[in-house]
Image (cartoon, helix red, strand yellow):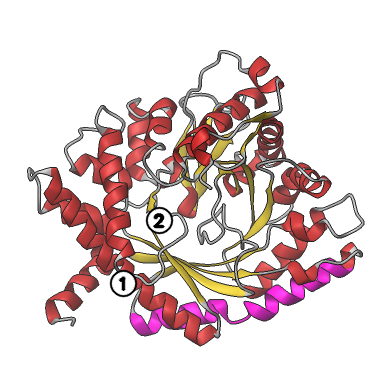
Amino acid sequence: MLNQKDVLSTIEMIDQQHLDIRTITMGISLLDCCDPDPKRACEKIYDKITKYAENLVKTGEDIEREFGIPIVHKRISVTPMALVAGASDTEDYAPFALAMDRAARTCGVNFIGGYSALVQKGMTRADEKLIRSIPEALASTEFVCSSVNVGSTRAGINMDAVALMGRIVKETAAKTAAQDGLGCAKLVIFCNAVEDNPFMAGAFHGVGEAERVINVGVSGPGVVCNALKAVRGQPFDVVAETVKKTAFRVTRMGQLVAQEASRRLDTPFGIVDLSLAPTPAIGDSVARILEEMGLETCGTHGTTAALALLNDAVKKGGVMASSSVGGLSGAFIPVSEDEGMIAAARSGTLTVDKLEAMTCVCSVGLDMIAVPGDTSADTISAIIADEAAIGMVNCKTTAVRLLPAPGKKVGDTIEMGGLLGSAPVMPVHTESSADFIARGGRIPAPLHSLKN
């Protein structure tokens, strides 16, 4: 039972430690919107999204006001669009993105995800058409987010898709050059993508999901960092236990909001995703949690071990607090969205190579990293392949969201504003990977994928 101390503690976490519900995301199946006529399909997509999500924003705002809990974003995720658009007789998939964007604007949400393709084992014609349309789709829309799954533990890595995605990232940056390549911030390349992720840019509504569902993403790096200040100098067992207890309390709040939103929207509750998702605000940083454990600067030796402890303790605490924890649930390390990581990258302590090592033990992967504008498509593809290999071998979700800002070089900064923040341009290896990427084909699944 809650006592006065618990209530006051929660108020303090919200007011002073940046505790929030990062997103209420409604997942919507669009499988019944398939139509041979692309214009009619787009009409069906718009009508269904606006019908189901009509009250999503208002409901979120009502809960925020009545419960006093900040709800930062309201979002929509839909069935991977390649599966829907594939039924239409057209070569131009951009109208499907425009239909999604128009629906998002009508509903008043912050983002809509699901302009996506799942190509871990091969590409259909629809998949390839959608992927090749991504640069135009992201340049001509405001709210649409895109994702492509290029590998899995069961299927291996589709290196033809990896090679193509390197070119797509470059084209997306070029088409949004006036905004420092902002389109790339809304494009993520996955290995082992999950079907119930409420976070952007990688959210889509999986084909195994219900007709519609409510997923909630909770965040609270500042709360965890503040809790660790009380155990400075204590053994790591104490650190882990402190993180677990804090994650439990944070997730309980997410469970409350998810169930209330589910009830009011008459939509089944899906999952709570407890991911420590930082923001550019001071006091809301994953990097500062790692430094609170005893590291002078995030990125120095010991960072990977500290992050492993954090990620594991968050999962253990969260899973006891909700009837259904899912999504990605762990610790995110998006450079541009974390003021501590921005500082560490600027100092030179945090490098792309170190970030790659950190992705072996945390949620997702190389996220929101600005690289020089002249970085080749082959190099970007090679980075994607490395990250996908980590996910494939370790049976975990990994991803890449790189920002090759046109005209920018190492030491420059790109500004995106809001939750996307700003990012110092970080160096990458200049030695060529072109011959490696040109091989194409598929990297086979690891032996331990054979579990039947």
Residue 424 in the image: above or below residue 100: above
Q: Amino acid at mark 2?
A: Ser
- Which residue is depicted at the point 45% across and 54% down? 328
Q: Are marks 1 and 2 in contact (CB under 8 Å)?
A: no
Along the viewing direction, whichever of 69 and 312 lies nearer the viewer: 312
Q: Position of residue 280 (x, y in %)?
A: 39, 49
Cα separation between marks 1 and 2: 14 Å
Q: Amino acid at mark 1?
A: Arg
- Number of numbered discs: 2
Along the viewing direction, whichever of 296 and 249 lies nearer the viewer: 249
SS at mark 2 in the image: loop
- Which residue is depicted at the point 37% across and 35% down? 358
Along the viewing direction, whichever of 283 and 313 lies nearer the viewer: 313
Residue 31 in the image: above or below residue 191: below
- Which residue is depicted at the point 63% across and 80% down? 54
SS at mark 1 in the image: helix
Residue 295 in the image: above or below residue 129: above
Q: Main secondary structure of the magenta part?
A: helix
Q: Position of residue 243 (x, y in %)?
A: 22, 55
Looking at the rendered structure, which numbered label has been put on residue 181?
none
Assess whether residue 172 is covered by the magenta stretch. no
Looking at the rendered structure, which numbered label has been put on residue 329?
2
- Indicate the quadrant where residue 11 lies: bottom left
Q: Which residues are magenta?
A: 40-67
Q: Residue furthest front?
A: 452
On the rendered structure, is 259 left or right of 131? left
Q: Position of residue 183 (x, y in %)?
A: 64, 45
Q: Earlier in the sequence, mark 1 or mark 2?
A: 1
- Please tell me how crowded label 1 is: few (under 14), some (14-19), or many (20+) other residues with Cα within 10 Å: some
Q: Position of residue 413 (x, y in %)?
A: 48, 34
Residue on which disc 1 sits = 252
- Please tell me how crowded label 2 is: few (under 14), some (14-19), or many (20+) other residues with Cα within 10 Å: many
